[in-house]
Image: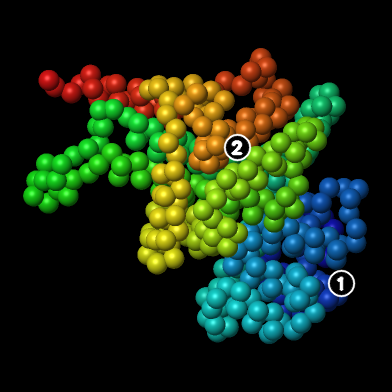
Amino acid sequence: MLSTPDQPSRDQLVDDLKLLREKGLPEIENLELPALGSAALIVVPAGERPDEAALVETLLRRAAARLGGGKFGDSAQALFGLDGDTRTVTAGVRREIAAERLGVAVRTFRRKHEDPMLDQVAHQVLVLCSEQGQREGRDEMAAEHPVESGMAALWVERFEAYYRIWSPITGLASDLTAYRSTLLEEPRPYDRRFGTDGPEDEGYSQEEQAEGYARDALYHYAFFEWQVRQFRALHGGLWLLSEPDVENAVSNAVYRISWHVNPYNERDQSYLRTLIDETPGQELHGFLTRLTSTVLGKATHQEWQDWCAGCECTWPPGAGEEELPTARSQRGVSDECQVHQVITACVDYCELIDTDWRKIADWYHLEGDQITKGKTAEALYSHWRSTQIATTPD
């Protein structure tokens, strides 16, 4: 193995990975793996390095974990023998297990899936190298700042994961709010009678418009569950924040989001994560197409729509322009409503993460103690609707 920490090429990493896959982890100390050894010296900071064989195995585990906890990631774990059941078995048996976990025949796996999998692991190794370079830059900055900012440098990698969860949480809360807000909107601008726009027009209703927001919310919920699983695979589900109370509050908010979606049990959540996992790029269109193409998916979707319909909360027009309506801010929102319990938990998570992020804001020369919030979806919609009314001819 090379001791000079020069970043290897993707092709060099793939060559090493092929050799390691064939020989297995028990032989790692006897193998020449210059590219992986070089990358490992980059990724693991000086002073924290065991022997190089252990270093390479640690790097491989971290790279494979980046592939996630779905079929593809599980298959990669088996291919390299990274779990207890596969470490000591032969290369052929590991390939069989990897194919089984991916749901394909061994021959198909070897011809169509194995090389792309090796390439993806190599890519994740290069990502880890790049991230370490950025981390060292942050460490240099932290040395010039107080201890609190030095601690913040350690949190940045975690905040990247927190904000990957933050994004679907924001979408979930906004779309659930839009669902109910649409049903409350007067004078029901989306109602359109059959045949209004020609003989082919089947008509449309305010309820159908609301159901569209509910479908989008279901996608965001499934993506949230998927991102949480990724977080657990990469970081063990350990929240690293400024104070233990904040860590507990964030963990509690994540738990409440799942718990209050009471039409679904753990198997339903697993089904939704699997759909997201199998959707190329985890995109909305592909997810909804898969969801509505099977009997199970249609039933899961209908359960979600029925759950959303259980919300009977009300709030005055424009009440969501400053913040999402919850029982804390609007009398007409019930603190027993499961939909709004989810929205409240989403708001809590986002506010907690945004507030803690301010701990390292001094690096970016931000001023003031308050976070400047953008306009809510409700505010943007109200503005758009007002312009539509203003430009509509009498």
**Real-space Cα separation, disc 1 to disc 2, in angstroms:** 49 Å
Label 1, secondary structure: give it.
helix
From this view, report whether residue 220 is shown above or below residue 362: below
The quarter of the displayed image where residue 87 is located: bottom right
Give x and y (percent) for residue 320: 45, 25
Give x and y (percent) for residue 196: 11, 41
For label 2, the residue is 345
Which of the two marks, 1 or 2, is nearer to us in this view? Answer: 2
At x 39% / y 61%, what residue is drawn? Answer: 298
| Nearer to the camera, 136 or 80 | 80
Residue 142 visible? The answer is no
Q: Left or right? Give the position of 135 relative to 263.
A: right
Label 2, secondary structure: give it.
helix
Give x and y (percent) for residue 115: 58, 72
Give x and y (percent) for residue 249: 71, 36
The quarter of the displayed image where residue 176 is located: top left
From this view, report whether residue 182 is shown above or below residue 118: above
For label 1, the residue is 29
Badge 1 crowding class, 10 Å Cα cut-off, few under 14, some 14 to 19, many 20 or more, is: some
From this view, report whether residue 314 is shown above or below residue 8: above
Name the amino acid type tagged 2: Ala
Q: Left or right? Give the position of 135 relative to 300.
A: right
At x 28% / y 39%, what residue is drawn? Answer: 206
Q: Left or right? Give the position of 315 relative to 109.
A: left
| Nearer to the camera, 212 or 229 | 212
Name the amino acid type tagged 1: Glu
What residue occupies the far top of the structure in this picture?
Answer: 368
Residue 30 visible? The answer is yes
